Amino acid sequence: MQVSVETLSDLERRVTVQVPAEKVAEEIHSRLQSLSRKVKVDGFRPGKAPLKLLKKIYGDQVRYETVTELMKNSLEAALIQENLNPLGGPNIQSKNLEEGQDLEYSATFEIMPEFELVGFETIQVERPVAEVVDQDVDDMIETLRQQRVIWNTVERPAQMGDQLHIDFNGQIDGQNFPGGSSENAGVVLGKGTMLKDFEDQLIGLSAGAEISFDLSFPNDYHAKNIAGQTAHFQVKVNTVEEANLPEVDDAFAESFDIKEGGVAGLRQSLRDNMERELRDGIKAAVKHQVLQGLLAANPVPLPQALIEVEIERLARQLHFPPGAQDEKNQQLKTQLFGTEARRRVALGLLLSRLATTQNIKADEQRVQTQLETVAASYQDPAEVIRWHAQNPQAMESIHALVIEDQLVEWLLERAQVSEKPSTFAEIMKPARPQAGAADQSASEESTE
């Protein structure tokens, strides 16, 4: 058997295998002899039919089975010989299957990247330093009040903070466009669900008022088909409503299941929760910086097979419609999930290598603590713990969380860490990306 290996890229290999014609003929002959003892042929006693006749009847089938098995066994031997470990199933292409000639085929596949981790000391981390202050609690209470707002219809011109229900229709060059019209749409002035220039046109209007105006969409507007264009809108105001917020009193506190202490008890409960959220937020911010630093210091080639698996996993997690597995569908999934999939695959490779080289294993006490923390958020924590104990895959996810935290701590000990003054609001509400996250728009439909 002859074996050759080609390097097609950093991770892609093509193995070409040649099996001598004599070996193929020998295996076919052996199979035919074995077959002769099993099959019945009219006119012959069992096992007495000549091989030439059996070959005429079963030759194609026997050759197919022989070649398939030879390819399987020879490829396994070739991979062991060349010390190669394919990721996923190889792509097999036959080169020569002619009878009487050497069997020749190629197998193309990806391998795991080989790399050494470096640059731990170059990782730079700014650890946010903040505390929950009275103003943060005040802001949280105001948020809770806003969540329980009651809207009352008023007979006056609209002002900032009011809620309007409007009919509107927008056209570009006399043509309707997606998301450019709606009936009885609700908009709270100043909340930013619509473009500011659109909301500004509504201030001072009363119920029954109608208005038309031109609106220019920003050049960087998320809906590329209308970015930079000017639309003409016609708007009718159906109702104007003002907010009626609940008083912050003992009844308000009781509505949040505060049994004792009234408003003071509510404030303390909120502070406790916010301090826990702040600790988690600081931990998440530090962890993100550590992992980003590890990625920046260790660019590694990524197996496309692993990326594709991760894309499919993300698509399922986010309930992406299965649809047809055609090229267009795959391109859309790659566009939506490709970047995050590449990041996750890279981090998986780096953290796995770090755990192996530093012999870092999950601390079982921390695993139990993490499990109890997860279970505590459910109505019956004991049942959740029992369920995990009976589901190895679920427990594996708990182990993964713990070992990832341990790896981040190991990296953090070697990173350059400084402190950065911050606030609860800054840590809990990081800057939104320019695209992909609830952009402002001229209508609720066009933000979807």
Image (cartoon, grey):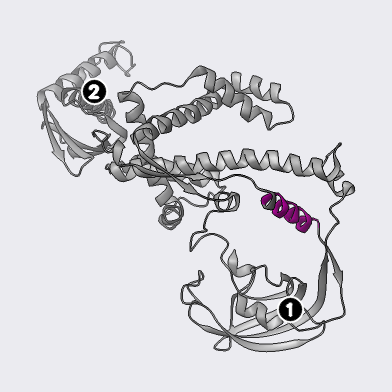
Secondary element at image label 2:
helix
Q: Quadrant of the N terminus?
A: top left
Residue 2, image x, y percentages: 10, 28
Q: Quadrant of the C terminus?
A: bottom right
Q: Which residue is mark 2?
A: 73
The residue sitting at 38% across, 22% down in the picture is 360
Q: Which quarter of the picture shows residue 175?
A: bottom right
Q: Is residue 390 visible?
A: no
Q: Nearer the viewer, residue 50 or 338?
A: 338
Counting residues from the start of the chain, the first of labels 2 and 1 encountered is 2
Q: Which residue is mark 1?
A: 167
Q: Which numbered tag is attached to residue 179?
A: none
Q: Which quarter of the picture shows residue 116?
A: top left
Q: Establish if 398 lies above or below 310.
A: above
Residue 70, image x, y percentages: 22, 25
The magenta stretch is 136-148
